[in-house]
Image (spheres, coloured by chain):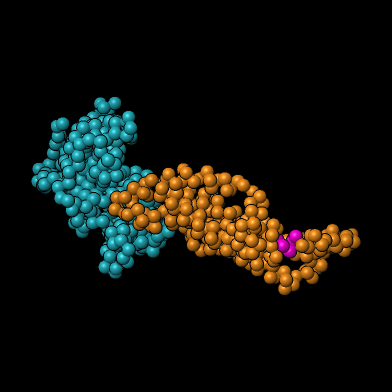
Amino acid sequence: MNAIVLTNRLNAAPAAPSEPVLSIAALHVRFGDVVAIENLSLTLRRGEFVSLLGPSGCGKSTLLKAVADLVKPSGGEIVRSDLNLRTGFMFQKPLLLPWRTTLDNVLLPTEIQRGGNAVDSAERQNALRMLDLVRLRDFSDAYPQQLSGGMQQRAALARALMCDPDVLLLDEPFGALDELTRDVLNEELIRIWQSKKTRLATVLMVTHSIPEAVTMSDRVIVLSSRPARIIEDVAVACPRPRAPEDADTAAIIRRVRAMVRSDR
Amino acid sequence: MISRALPPLAFALLLLVAWQAIVTVGEIPEYLLPSPTAILATVDRSLAVSFAVTFLEALAGFLIASVLAFAIATLFVRFHTLEEGLFPLAIAVKTTPIVAIAPLLVIWLGTGWWSKIVAAILICFFPVLVNTVKGLKAADVEYRELFETLGASRGQEFRKLRVPYCLPYLFSALKISSSLAVVGAIVGEFVGATQGLGYLIMISSAHLETATLFSAIFAAAIAGIAMFYAISFAERRLIFWSSGEAE
């Protein structure tokens, strides 16, 4: 597959590609007779924001779940550069536990890591810091059913960040929200990714929105319909912050749209 | 709370007044239909003792059945083969009428407390088992995936996800089985007992002491209602997040 680089401005060049953090090599995933992913190879480098773009049911979520070890590949391998590499996973649904407050939901990963031991005050402070980061501090004592859909996803993001992940895996994280809320949360996600307040460096996000993928990512991996193969690996080098209306961003959006169309 | 209790109390009072009036005006003999005041006159220490005996038998059966059913449901969910193998047996126990089993219980366990407690256990066990199995499996597969990505052990998933998720299902079953427990205890007493409301009902009907019979029936109803409302109260306190009814 060839990488298309569309750079319109000189200062737009992203940081030099750094070391790979995660390599997917000749991955095959099969569910019974259905081949979900066929011979797919992809390398994620530290600091990259990568989107997996494809039609519904193409196997992009399966790919993400394979990276998260939720799905066993039937062939190929997924190599982590570092055995201590931590991944965080965020689902399309917030999946908050309704009997826990926002703060206690965010503390769930910590509780699980500590086994039977009680969470200490430093960890509570850390959870509050994460709630600050997603701008939900004021709702730390609220229960999920008292929060709006967007706020619930903010809490889910804070919870995913509590694992202190190097790589964040996002499965259409704001796909169930209305467009306005979704735009705001996408911007917040970029802000947190860029903030360096967490270890988080690398993001792999599944989406079926072309503007979302292009506006947010350093690379857009365009996938075919099932079985998922990579059609194109599109590098997006436009300067940030971006908007879908920017001339250079819009050009790439049109370009990607044409690729997706040609697959049908 | 008071305003909610007012309408049913008012209607109950109205009904009692009408009943009293009909019996008095119609001069209905007491062995056919005793008046509310005649029934009230039979409330004495021996009725209170009968009530306590039956209530404690039902409560003991209910508690033992609930703990047992929860434990077995846990095993069923953990070991699927066990569920497949034993579920038909559980259905067989459920579908056999308690009235048919009660004489056997008296032969095996005597006319004391245990035959009644076991009758209550048999009648309470099944609803709790079925709902607990259902509740422990009710958490969406995505929730289980979340716990998997967080590296949770099976025990952690059970304690932090499955059990709280199951509580609304469990309590629906407890509400049903709590009132059934009283039925179990009374059926056990019918077959062979020397005390309790079931015994009192048998004796008073044999002697045509209809007023005593009525007071025993009301006492049995009160025992069931008390169990039901105690569970409902605990449910509202404990499960604040779920307003919906889980079956």
Instruction: Say whether residue B201 is magenta.
Output: yes
Residue A153 vs residue B40, the one in the foreground: B40
Residue A203: tell me if it is visible.
Answer: yes
Quadrant of the image containing the C terminus of chain A:
top left
The part of the image, by quadrant, that contains residue A192 is bottom left
What is the number of callouts on the image? 0
**Depth check, front residue: B86 or B152:** B86
Tell me, by letter, which chain the rendering colours cyan: A
The furthest residue to the bottom: B45
Q: Position of residue B185 (x, y in %)?
A: 64, 59
Give me the residue at 33% from left, 58% from top. Answer: A108
Q: Which portion, as a residue range, is magenta? A: B197-202
Q: For this view, does A225 lie left or right of residue A100?
A: left
The reply to whether residue B13 is in sight is no
Q: Position of residue B216 (x, y in %)?
A: 73, 63
Which residue corresponds to the image point at 23% horizontal and 41% vertical from the top-left? A51
The orange one among the chains is B
The answer to which quarter of the image holds residue A235 is top left
Residue A166 on image: x %, y %: 20, 52
Looking at the image, which residue is at 25% across and 38% down?
Answer: A73
- Magenta span has A15? no
Residue A237 placement (x, y as % from top left): 15, 41
Query: Would you say A2 lies left or right of A59 here?
Result: left
Examine the residues drawn in magenta and state their main secondary structure: helix
Q: Image check: B5 left or right of B82?
A: right
Q: Residue visible at 42% across and 59% down? A: A99
Residue A213 occupies which quadrant of the picture? top left
Name of the residue lying farthest toward the front? B107
* Quarter of the figure that contains the N terminus of chain A: top left
